[in-house]
Amino acid sequence: MRHPIPILVTGAILALATGCRPPPQERTPVGSGEQADEPEPRPSPPPIYDAQGVRLPQDALPLGTPVPVGLEERSSGTGWVRWEGPVDPDEVTTFYDTYLTLPPLKAPHQVGRSIRYLDARPRQPGNPGRPVEVHVIPEQGGTRCAVTIWDVTVLEQEQDEEEEPIDLRDWKPSYPGEKIPSELL
């Protein structure tokens, strides 16, 4: 026969022990989709506008083309540069409508989500500027914008190098039995 006293003492000790422990933390089930807190995004610089309400250009002129205040350079290559930042794409489009000159009877056009200014030239007093292509690309549901600027002269040089004609005397078969292409005959 068991004595009730040890059972009561054990129960009292357990009751006291559970009262001293901190309450259990709430746990989220594995795979619930909650992740650690993301760092807060950097505050964007305050926008600066001219008298007409259009964003002002930055001091930097990539490929001689103005870029609106609020965008930062992200990457570049031979004849192109990409800028992006937390700027409304409509403001950037308005900016380039003001600060770029297009050839007569040409207008910016939309390709997919991007707005393209083809064969544009920066408006600079006393300087016609170099011909450029400017692509304005909205990102993250229109809360950010990317701008890619291409130098048209570099693009044309690359196309000319790719279309180098092949001389029939220089042609060699790639594999045994290959026939001469019809464009060389």
Image (cartoon, rainbow, N blue to C red):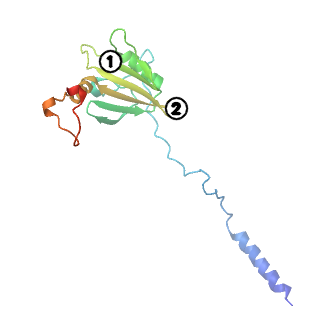
The reply to whether residue 160 is in sight is no
The reply to whether residue 79 is in sight is yes
Residue farthest toward the left in the current orientation of the protein: 169
Residue 104, compared with residue 116, is above or below; it is: above
Disc 1 element: strand
Q: Residue at x 80, y 85 (%)?
A: 6
Q: Is residue 97 left or right of residue 19?
A: left
Near mark 1 (Cα within 10 A), the count class, few <14, some 14-19 or many ≥20, is many
Res. 24 mark: none
Q: Position of residue 48 (x, y in %)?
A: 42, 24
Screen quadrant of the N terminus: bottom right
Q: Position of residue 83 (x, y in %)?
A: 37, 32
Residue type at the position of mark 2: Gly
**Of residues 182 and 103, the one drawn nearer to the viewer in this rendering:** 182
Residue farthest toward the front in the current orientation of the protein: 177
Q: Position of residue 135 (x, y in %)?
A: 38, 25
**Of residues 169 and 80, the one drawn nearer to the viewer in this rendering:** 169
Q: Residue at x 85, y 85 (%)?
A: 4
Residue type at the position of mark 1: Ala
Q: Residue at x 32, y 12 (%)?
A: 103
Res. 141 mark: 2
Q: Is residue 34 left or right of residue 163?
A: right
Q: Quadrant of residue 109?
A: top left
**Mark found first going from the N terminus, 2 or 1:** 1
Disc 2 element: helix
Residue 23, compared with residue 172, is above or below; it is: below
Q: Position of residue 46 (x, y in %)?
A: 45, 29
Q: Give the Cα distance between marks 2 and 1.
A: 27 Å
> Residue tagged by mark 1?
120
